[in-house]
Amino acid sequence: MTEQERFHRYLARNPHLHNPAFFERPHWTRRRFFEACGAGLTGFFLDPARAAEVTGLKATPQGTARNCIFILLAGAPSHIDTFDFKNVAGVTPADFAPESVNGIGMFPIGLFPKLKNSLGDLAIVRSVRAWAAVHGLAQTWVQIGRNPTAALGDIAPNIGSIVAIEKEAERQPNQVFPTFLALNSAGAIAQGYLPAKYAPFKAAPSTAGLRNMSSTAMGGPGVFNDRYNLLRLLDDSVRLRSPYGRKIEDLDGFYSAARLVIDNPAMNRAFSYTPADAARYGNNAFGNSCLVAKQVLAANQGTRYIQLTLGGWDNHQNIYVANQGIYRQARLLDDALAALLGDLKSSGLLNETLVVVMGEFGRTVGRLTADLGRDHFLQQFVLFAGGGVKGGRVIGATDAEGRFTADPGWSRGRDIRPEDVEATIYSSLGIDWTKTRWDDPLGRGFEYVPKAKDDVYGPINELWA
């Protein structure tokens, strides 16, 4: 039996809406292609997701933000040296220069001289605890808002992917940017069991912008369009409503999405920047990511969730060595976050953008270890700004050393967990955090926030009070 005969036998056993004859017109016509490009619509962004029954309590979200910037401080910063500052006698360096700031308490001005001017916009939540003190596990936990080792943990989508699927209906015909963007975040958790169009678009910003965004290297717009049309003519019948599964359909979505951003001036402007702008943000990978995040939101091209990552906080040794240890990472955060908050505020975007900053856990309290560092510790902090959040204050508390204590600012009277942070993000963006989707592969029902229907976890509403 020849390969052709095997192929026809396969088609007979697997009926599908395509004809294997090469010269017959495929499902996607040339006219349909140009209509889609002209309207700025593609299957990647706007085709309906596969049907899913969604249930929930119909909770009332805050709905004060349109966008969210989530900054992961990978490696776990020491909370008692930063935003839950404790001056440890004979240990804390004098050049931390702590000062009492109204509404915040003692703050290490020496570490964050620029953020001092942004404290009025920051709400610092201190009674936050992690569930695990293992980097990979805890970093995944804060990105998916649940236990990665639980039944649905290995197929759970990133919080940004849930935002993308929820915000899909709000996209306008001219908006061609991905809804979920991950900058300087190569390790960002992906879309889990959801279709690939809800995955993070990962990019590493540079002054040259994004690579391969111009058709010039391909022979110009005319040649590029001809080649793209030929591609669709040859294999649309395999990729559209593919008999080979969703991965092939996802690939078709990537093709369509990439076609829209080629030669797109809005894309080029948002992802490129001048050396002078980069210098204001610190002139480094994290700072450039913050700069691009600001420009992407200003472009208003459909991006609603941006994840950024600043690693290097794993200070087991020599945490207080000058120009190294915590000093180096604090300077990177101070330069970039202060510039980001300042630019968002001056443009009016901070009012509609929730900024969240957190690590995966914190660091041991009291005196340093024998290696002059701090080890893993479950206590941590989370910063919130923008999106209607009332800044210049602290929610929750720790004891004199930096351990959890009863939280007078949290209505549930307990520690705050990553699931509560997740619910807060959803609520801010107008998403009902009590929803459950019933399209997961295990058929168990995927809760946006675990146990939210039982009121175990929920938004930190004190941020808006």
Image (cartoon, rainbow, N blue to C red):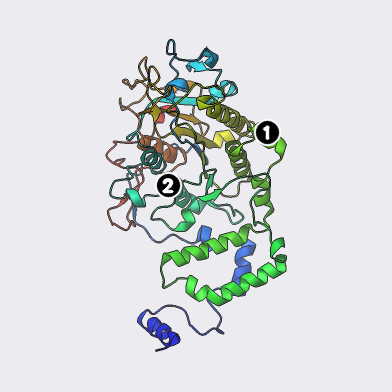
Above or below, comparing residue 213 to residue 228 in the picture: above
Left or right, 299 with respect to 149, comes to right
Helix, strand or loop for disc 2: loop
Which residue sits at x=52%, y=62%?
A: 253
- The quarter of the rendered structure image containing the N terminus is bottom left
Label 1 or label 2, whichever lies nearer to me, is 1
Which residue sits at x=47%, y=46%?
A: 187
Can I make out residue 248 in this image? yes
Q: Quadrant of residue 49?
A: bottom left
The amino acid type, in three-letter code, at marker 2 is Asn
Which residue sits at x=71%, y=40%?
A: 274
Q: Position of residue 150 (x, y in %)?
A: 28, 46
Q: Position of residue 136 (x, y in %)?
A: 39, 41
> Observer-nearest residue: 61 or 262?
262
Which residue sits at x=61%, y=42%?
A: 292
**Label 2 packing within 10 angstroms: few (<14), some (14-19), many (20+):** many
- Between the residue at mark 1 and the residue at mark 2, the CA separation in whole angstroms equals 31 Å
Q: Mark on residue 279?
A: 1
Left or right, 82 with respect to 147, comes to right
Q: Quadrant of residue 293?
A: top right
Helix, strand or loop for disc 1: helix
Q: Position of residue 216 (x, y in %)?
A: 72, 61
Q: Earlier in the sequence, mark 1 or mark 2?
A: 2
Instruction: Give the residue at mark 2.
Output: 158
